[in-house]
Amino acid sequence: MKFTPQVGLYVGALAALTTVAHAVPTISVTPPDKSRFLVGQRFDLRVEGKPATGSAITAGTLAVDGTPVTFSSQDSFSGVTGYNLRAYSNAAPGSHTLTATLTDGTGTATATAKFLVINPNGGRRQSKNIIIMLGDGMGAAHRTAARIVMGGYSANQSVPLLNMDGFPGTGMVMTSSLNSIVTDSAPGMSCYSSGSHANNGQEGVYPATFSTPFAQPRVEYLAEYMHRLQGKNLGIVSTADIEDATPAANVVHTGNRNLGQGICDQYLDEIGNSGLTVLMGGGRRWFLPSTSFGSSRSANNDYAGLPADLTAAWNIPAGTIDPNRDLIGDFKTAGFTYASSKTDLDAALAGGKVPAKLLGLFGYGNMNVSLDKIAKRRNPSAAGVVDDYHAPDQPMLDEMTGAALKTLGANSPNGFFLMVEGAHIDKQSHLMDADRAILETIEFDKAVGAARDFAASNGDTVVIVLADHECSGFSVIGALNNGPNGGGGTAGSIANLKSKASDAAATDPATTPIRQGVVGVYDAAGFPAYTIAADGYPAQTDIDGKLLIGFGANGDRYEGWLTKPLPVIDSLLPAAFKTELAGGGVGTGQKYPTEPINRAESALGFFLRGQVPGTQAVHTATDIPISAYSSSNRSFEQFIGVQQNTDVFFKLARAAFGGY
Ligand SMILES: [Zn+2]
């Protein structure tokens, strides 16, 4: 989901505040009250606040369990004064208390916060490899829809399961962030990868007032913790632009998820902390010098000038504003083999050879959706959507996952942490493009199968499948049917649907739109039956009796029930690409819609007034399903039941350290 960039000030919610004495300065302490950490997990301590009007902060103190700490820096920005101790950790399991004070000319304010330290170590057999399969925005209904399309239901018969359905440990996860019941993908992912809640739009940091969001107080990610203590390597694979929140929230620490250049630079700049070995997805635009075709690098989305105590304590560079950096070249210098296409990827792994490290950038922004990638594979000679996106030869997510597992498996004697994201389940649900969202779920499930096969054949691996949140209130409402208003023709046929005149202008509730009448509900939905082609995807999506999807968290749109011929122009593309697509694209000459409501073919449907502002669907606070599998131990059992999102982090850590 597009997240509105914060401009200028990064003034986070002061969520840590628990008690304020009678004095006048405001005060907050970081980490927020009731945070939880692993034994020895690193995080930054901070006390900040504003003085009373006309006064100035003169002193700050912080004590852990009554013992004063020595701050490593003091800063002042936007009228807020802060005191920091970077990369603190605590080795003693149990509850601890932070007591902070800030003093100005009018008096002293006090705040307290508790945090809990948890020991993940134990004598059980450790999971050497940790794999998170993250279907962005994937709720239960996305899984249901993919299962119906792939396997079909029929009366009184058993239903073929998705790969993820077959995992033995299934539960539910709550998905709130630090500042809302409804999360975006940045805290959605970093809850699983850091154990701490973050504010929306932020990943791997706590809210604080700094001149750059990259300086906000950090919390160590699981990948960093395991690399430091166990020597594990890290792999990140996504169909998104690799700057996007979900991939970045495994290793990049920033209070602004939209600063793509700084985020992509940090993947490489902080490789010493993460053991990053595989990075694959879209987002080539951030890796090309600003003067190159398709580059989005510019001076205003980078990181630079990180505080000296931060860089010293975490052993990272301060950063440089460098729009002309050749980041692909720098990755190659660091030992990465680079693939820009499926052909390149196949070549990198041809004949049983395995690269030491692998960088794959298969699109300039987000990679294309499986529906459009498959269309090109089925008809290579015809210009298609992928040509218009300047990325005609993209791998599927299961192919990327297989390459990642080969590379990590061969180069990680101490094991690895791999996160694989099916990004467009979310993105196409925002756009209320039901068939593209369903096919992306199918593509994601094939990648789940690749991860499970690796775990089964290599042992000592735990795989969890989950989402960061649900998106769009996705709902399986029925199937195409002749219905009471359907009139004539073959029951539920596409031909019948296409024969219906437009009633896009009918907005009076007293008028039943014709295409609303073709929705078969209850027994009229029957059992939609798709034909699966040899490539593993539906031969067609517009079949007679097709599955129909409703959106419970929708923006304004027209609904016509047919597969949308073109995707909505992706928000994460170089600006010139968007302009080109809006004008028709380079290959097909077809004009791409800029928003769901602007689809030319949508006028053939009927108008639906959304209950949320705008023309896109939104994330919901609905719990999401989690499915877990583990080989060589029973750590999957931890994930059965209902749990908080931050619980998942501690359960994965226990799997890795044998303490479950
Ligand atoms: Zn989203």
Image (tube, helix red, strand yellow):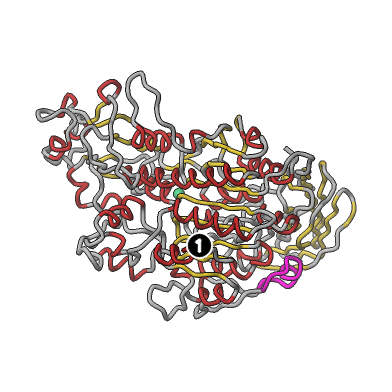
Q: Quadrant of residue 203?
A: bottom right
Left or right of 562 in this view: 171: right
Whether residue 318 appears in this view of the structure is yes
Q: Nearer the viewer, residue 160 or 241?
A: 160
Q: Is residue 613 visible?
A: no
* Residue at point 49%, 70% (across, down): 338
Determine if the magenta segment contains residue 240. Answer: no
Residue 286 falls left or right of residue 457: left
Give coordinates of residue 418: x percent, y percent. 58, 53
Instruction: State the extent of the magenta-drawn residues as a range.
Output: 306-317
Residue 316 in magenta?
yes
Vertical order, 112 against 143 (above or below): below
**Crowd tier of the residue under label 1, counting other residues whose Cα lies within 10 Å: few below 14, some 14–19, many 20 or above:** many
Residue in the image at 16% along x and 28% along y: 491
Which amino acid lies under the numbered mark 1 shown in the image of this protein?
Glu
Q: Which residue is mark 1?
A: 243
What is the quadrant of residue 657 in the picture? top right
Residue 114 locus on image (x, y percent): 78, 44
Above/below status of 311 relative to 416: below
